[in-house]
Image: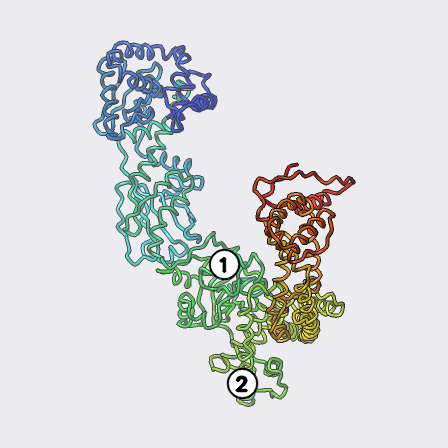
Amino acid sequence: SILEVAPFVRFYAPNFALLGFASKAGERILGRPANSLISLDEVFDSVESSLRKAPNLEESFAVYDKILDQVISEIPVMQRLQSKLILKAMLILSLDGNGTTAGEISEAMLIYDENDPQKSINETKELLLRFAAVFPDDVWNKDDGINEPRFGIRVSGKDDLNTSLEEATCSVPLDVVPQILTRLAKDRFFDWTMSSESEDGAASSMECSFMWRGGLRRSKVYWNWNGEFAGSGGDAGASRDFDAEILINSWNYSDEVLDPNRRRCRVLWNAAKLTGEEIATLQRLYILLHDTSLKEQYAEQVRAAGHTHMVSAGKIFGRVFFLDSLVTANEEKLVIPAEILEKTSISEVISGTLASYFDNQYPEHPIFESQLGMHEVSALVSEFFSGAKHDSPEIQRLAETYAFPLGLVKEDRGEYVVLGEEEVNELSAAQKILSALEQSDDGTLALDEIYPILRERPLGLAKEAQHLILGFLVSHRKVEFVTTKGDRINHRSLDLKIIWDDIFGIAKPNEVEFDYAMLTGWARAITKNESIEVFNGVKGRDDAIGALSEWLDSWEQTAVFEKFNKLPDEILNTRIWRVSVRVEKSFGAVAKTLRSIVEGSVTLEDGLQRVAETFFDSAEELFARINDLRVLEDFIDGAIKRKEIWSYLAICESTQDESIEKFRANLLRLIDESYNMPSLERNQEMQETWETFRDKYTEHFAIRHNAIMNSQQLKQEFEAILKSDEWWEFECLSKLPIFRLSNWHKAEIILKRFRALECNFDVRENLKTHPFCACSFSLQKMSELAKLSHSLLQTISVGRKSYRKTLFMICDFISALVGEVVENDKDQVLKKEAEAMIQNFRDQNSEALTSTQLSILYSAMYLLPNSTSISISFPSEGGLYTSEELRSRVNVWLDDLPNEPILLKM
């Protein structure tokens, strides 16, 4: 509403700027709820002072003020605000001279009751009627009994223009209505080219293409307002190039020539009936556009009135052609989607309206993700079906987008390839074309004869999709193109750019004169059997077929592709993928052709001709593909062995042996080379190197394994340690509660590792499949395992020293406790042992304790009270240390401190 009324506001208030108003209003609503809108009352409030200064609006505002004072002031307070909003809207909407309705005011001012929408409109209408009843000379009310009543405040100057328009309308013929409607269509749709009449007086028409499921459909649109065009009836020739015939008619048109056998879609787009007020609006718009005398007399008022009439006419157009129109396709009623109203292209309007109809008529039509045009068709035919650039990313994308939905290609190992010979014969579209070609008298079929066949239900293919299928059939030697000059284009010429306008139709392939010497040469080259004689007719044919059959049996037994497909994806690379594709397209195709020869579905001559064409009649191409086949076979043969070797090497320990490590490096190099450049020689070298490495590694590992896991010397060393007095003292002292057990835990770990040094497995047998033994032995830990006895001795020594430091530190407490233990004992030997032990502690003597002394010490330690405390000081040694060295010295000092229950005083 604001956009529609803006020109009239600016006419009376020249300083009013719509963008400036919108900017300021936008700032104001930032503080309001998120669903707030800008309505007409804000326009009124922003320009009221300017409008009151306009001379032509003095009387209008006088009426406005009187309504405020005499009508709205008497309305209950709770309804007064809404009444003021309605009055403001009526004044603003009266500026165009056409007034407004209660519904338009309710919509513009957002006056709405969710529970009863009509209630708010009725209340607004009652208020407007009250305004008109109180001030009948100032507030006008037009009610024709058909349309909704219109109300307005009289505006000076506008009444004169409206009067002139009403007088001029009486002399305007109804013929101007379709002229205005076609003008509105041109303004609404950028691709509309029709007028209300053609130059010869017949119905105006235009061609219009629209999209459906990615295909380009063609239609002929007729402006048939007066029923001049009867249609092409059942004449297929008249509509050969069109998928739909669309007649835009007035509301009283009926189709009397409907042919139920019509192949195309005939659409009747009947407009809704125009009301008297709508016709008058269109007539007034015609006057405003063409009457120069009015423009001279009323100047700016005509421009503003023209704008409002154009807006009203646009609404009329939307109603009669979309909201209330009747659209049928072959007598089937169509529903116009709501989003069509916003379209600015007649092509999009037709596409959206006919989509559901085409879906029902042609359910088997494929869905293309994007538009299929002749550019895409030419690229697929000349570069994909010809085999010239079938593996390029762009051509693969086109094949996926267009050829795959049509069923012309299939996906094979991540790539799109054309269908095989047997699969081609199963395509319904191909069957229809070949059947029609077979029934033709001269063995040819014009494109004009093919189009209706493939356009029939349920497929309904457009011209571009049909051309793609024809190119596909040519590539399979099923047909050949025939030009308008009578020339032939067969599968060999598809890689050249095809000018489709020069293609007349298709024909059966010409009979080929075979070069039997050449064909025999290809049979010898494929089978590597030089004894095959040149065959002609019956002679030599059986021998040639027999040799080809033997090659085919050998090929199938080799099962190259079956083996390749079983390989895991992670061991493949891009190069070998491409090699496999080339081999499959060459020898894979050859195998299928030879199978057809052996089974008799293809003649020997034709089959060998196809074999030659597979290799482009080139011996160099054949040798290149033979080399590809060898590479593929070598890769397959080496793949399993590479996996076995790599799995072994991945967890194989380093030996520090230069000879063995050199073989390891060579083996890794050969694995890489056989992966990137597979060959029989590399596979053999890799196998030999692998066997040598494994033998040397096995010998190296087994010798060192047995030296540790079955070492008698290591057992004897441990037995001697565990029988020594030092071990006995260490073990006994470790059980006293005052000592920290860190050293004892170290000793336990060493003993546990030693006891695990026993293996009864066959290490050499294990090393054939795994680079390790089932026991705990490891080459990396061999040196550590060999020094276990030394580690145990060192741990015992450190532990004994730590324990004695603690004993020396609490010697006085021990002396008192020992005295209590032996005080009442009459055994003099026991007392002497106790005295000797205490003296050794005071002298800080490291002499080993006797069993008696240990017994006394045990008894004394258990008498130690919990509250016992001793004074200690931090180590006094000075010097420079790194953080790690200092941390180590402090940890040693902490380990030497007595454990609980003795308290330490720093």
The 10 Å Cα crowd at callout 1, few under 14, some 14 to 19, many 20 or more, is many
The residue type indicated by label 2 comes to Ile
The residue type indicated by label 1 comes to Glu
**On the rendered image, what quadrant is the N terminus found in?**
top left
**Residue 726 % position (x, y):** 69, 59
Residue 226 versus residue 370: which sits nearer the camera?
Answer: 370
559 above or below 113? Answer: below
**Residue 333 % position (x, y):** 28, 48
**Residue 114 % position (x, y):** 27, 30
Residue 775 versus residue 433: which sits nearer the camera?
Answer: 775
Instruction: From the viewer's perspective, tell me whether residue 20 is left or right of residue 232.
Output: right
Quadrant of res 238: bottom left
**Residue 633 % position (x, y):** 61, 74
Upstream in sequence: badge 2 or badge 1: 1
Residue 721 versus residue 710: which sits nearer the camera?
Answer: 721
Residue appearing at x 37%, y 23% in the figure: 39
Residue 211 versus residue 346: which sits nearer the camera?
Answer: 211
For the image shown, how many numbered marks are present on the structure? 2
882 above or below 526? Answer: above
SS under mark 2: helix
Question: For mark 1, what is the residue?
Answer: 400
**Which mark identifies residue 545?**
2
